[in-house]
Image (tube, helix red, strand yellow):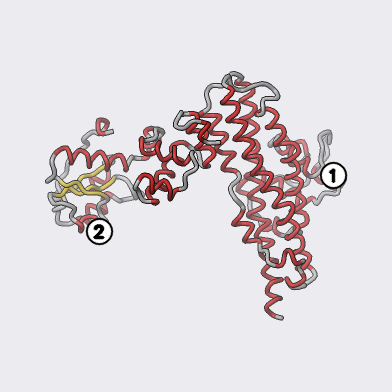
Amino acid sequence: MINENNKMVDLVHKNHVLISVFSRFGISLGFGDKTIREICEEKKIDLQFFLEIVNSFLDHDYFPREQLKSFPIRLIVDYLTKTHHEYLTKTIPEIESVISGREGICYKDKEHNFLMNTFFQEYKDELITHIKREDEQVFPYALEVEQCYLQKKSAESLPDKFRDYTISRYLQEHDDVEEKLFDLKNIIIKYLPPPKNPRLCYRVIVLLFNLEKDMNDHSRIEEKVFVPKVAMMEKVIRRKNSRQ
Amino acid sequence: MLEEMSFTGKIHYSEDLSQIGKSNADYIFVDSDIPDMKDLYKQVRSGDKEEWPVLIALTHHRKDNNLLSSGFFKHFLDLSQPKSEILHSLVEITKNNLPPNKATVREEKLSEREKSILRFVALGYTNKEIAEKLFISMHTVITHRKNITRKLGIKTVSGLTVYAILNQLIDMNNVG
């Protein structure tokens, strides 16, 4: 388990993929031999929250934890939003650049390149819709609920557009965007023919595996931390309704 | 599949039934007339052996309803039938009950029925429409789709469509 006195560099050596988690907190490379505590102080990052995110990323058994639920929704939403931003502006374009053929063609047959690209575009559209819904509706709702809760108000004080929304609806609609990603991987690995450019295809696979892993962690935070916390606050403020 | 099966042993119900508990047989055929199934069942299902081996009753009557309702047997084989029928039933039983280690090797190939269902799914038909077209129940369609997903490792309709195109089950122009 990582603690505040560990050096940031040791974290990277444990799992280099964490570098992308750092960027969501505004931590860039070049941090020398500083400890986690030093860097969090410097960058004004909530130390405990950072440790929770990093530990749950490294060890799936560490998760979910009561501690994560004790953080304000603002912190959780902020982290999730930054992750979305990264998906939209970095991760997806990177995969797209390779799959669309901009860096060379994967398969000899035009039709096969087309199939792979089309399938990816469908996935991308679904993912963008999913992210937009969260960023524009679900997260603002959660922040409003928290405001209500902290000010000990009832659900009546929620803005009109949020009055009838519940977080359980979000869970129901939390469609499995990951299924398409899973299928795309298998299609490239198993069912598309041997690629003309194997190195390129391999890069696609690696990017897809990384994205899948990251999205799984992301979903787990949403479902196991974010939702229960909002649901708990929701219950309290709606109870105030019926009392009146 | 039948060619790969081999006979592992025979035992009389009056003998030491604990031998069955130790056997590594996948299927056990039992004469439905034996007096006490409970002991035998206990031996077969000892430890963590919940699903395997499969217990099949041997009978000489057409569909003896009591046989399956007792819960001991998963299937029965009617020995009063002509040999070809018995063989056919045996093939069906073993096809639908493949032991886990053998199942993973055997099952990547889609059956003809599964291929035609896959074709319809890729062309955009709903489960209901497929059931109507093939004169089968929706439950059957769904079971087929689950098997297809399991065999191919593909979950979404789009994924299945790509697979269908790549394996020439449908033409790309039909999809749009």
Dot 1: few (<14), some (14–19), or many (≥20) neighbours within 10 Å?
Answer: some
Q: Is residue A160 left or right of residue A193?
A: right
Badge 1 marks a residue whose secondary structure is helix
Q: In this view, does B86 lie to the left or right of B170?
A: left
Choose between B64 and B45: the one closer to the eye.
Answer: B64
Choose between B89 and A109: the one closer to the eye.
Answer: A109
Decide: is A147 above or below A28.
below
What type is the residue that disc 1 sits on? Glu
Which residue does the image show at 86% across and 45% down from the upper left? A43
Q: Mark 1 highlights which residue? A: A38
Which residue does the image show at 40% across and 44% down from the upper left? B144
Q: Mark 2 highlights which residue? A: B69
Q: Where is residue B54 in the image (x, y as percent from the top left)?
A: 28, 46
Q: Where is residue A77 in the image (x, y as percent from the top left)?
A: 75, 53
Q: Quadrant for residue A223, please give it.
A: bottom right
Chain designation of label 2: B
Q: Position of residue A26 (x, y in %)?
A: 82, 42
Which residue does the image show at 77% across and 71% down from the upper left? A157
What's the CA distance linking mark 2 and mark 1?
Answer: 70 Å
Q: Nearer the viewer, mark 2 or mark 1?
A: 2
Q: Quadrant for residue A69, please give it.
A: bottom right
Q: Can residue A59 be seen in this view?
A: no
